[in-house]
Image (spheres, rainbow, N blue to C red):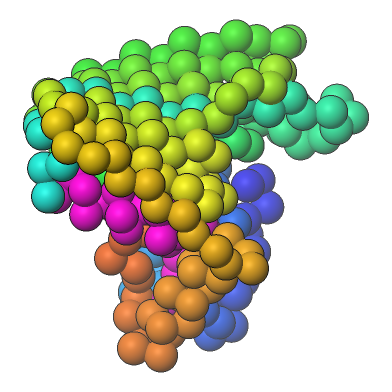
Amino acid sequence: PFVHYRQILDCLNHGKHVLCEKPLCETADQARELFALAHSKHLTLMEAQKGLFLPAWQDIRSWLDGQRIGRVLAAEASFCRRNTLDRSHWVFTMPCNGAMYDVGVYPLAELLSLFPAATISLKRTDAYAGECPISSVITMVNADGVLLDVKASIDYTAENYLNIYGESGRIECRDFWKTRTALCIPDSGERILKNYDYPSEFTFEINHFSELVRQGASESPRMSSALSIREIGIVEKRG
């Protein structure tokens, strides 16, 4: 991410549409500047968050909208995978280092996209190796009263998941950023298990971005400028 800002700036100034790997850049201020430039030049700019375009995300959104598990009380998402790269790698050394910049943006964007109400409280706790926050936990409560919990680590490997808990059931999705299954478990009624078959989890975000370009849209309604700015604004503030 420490090179994204300059690369995106150069692309936009040369009249190119940009689909950029997550996270979009280092700070929320940089993101605001980049989206403003894209809008002014009538170019499409989108942060690549593949999990938000998978069929599972759409089914989960449909289950939530259809009240399949009742009013949502809490949701949690985790991406913890030990990073075995040399400690000179940017993820350990650059100012924008650590678990949240590397893998934590996946669970954070997932929860913010599904539960977009304004955050009314937020607490972040980091575990450090030197000056690098190698593990992070972020707990939020939004304006709808939903408790949101994000866990990220580049220090240890764990089971990675998206779990959503409602008054009358729950939703489970393992490896949500590349998943091929999603499970809805109402307290009453049959379980709904969805299985998906596709060659690559990148296909859906690429198709979405291509359609935005064809339509002449400046940004995605799903991975919007507001979502990218909100996400990176949380990531850049350490605990």
| Magenta region | 40-65
Image x and y of residue 167, in percent: 12, 24
Above or below, 36 relative to 24:
below
Q: Quadrant of the rendered structure where residue 97 is?
A: top right
Residue at left offset 37%, top offset 47%: 193
Above or below, 232 relative to 133:
below
Residue at left offset 27%, top offset 34%: 185
Kindly report the secondary structure that dominates the magenta region of the rendered protein.
Answer: helix
Magenta stretch holds residue 48: yes
Residue at left offset 73%, top offset 10%: 130
Closest to the observer: 83 or 92? 83
Point out the residue furthest to the front here. 190
Closest to the observer: 162 or 145? 162
Residue at left offset 37%, top offset 41%: 183
Q: Is residue 72 left or right of residue 2?
A: left
Image x and y of residue 210, in percent: 48, 82
Above or below, 198 relative to 62:
below
Closest to the observer: 186 or 49? 186
Point out the residue furthest to the bottom here. 214
Q: Is residue 65 left or right of residue 217?
A: left
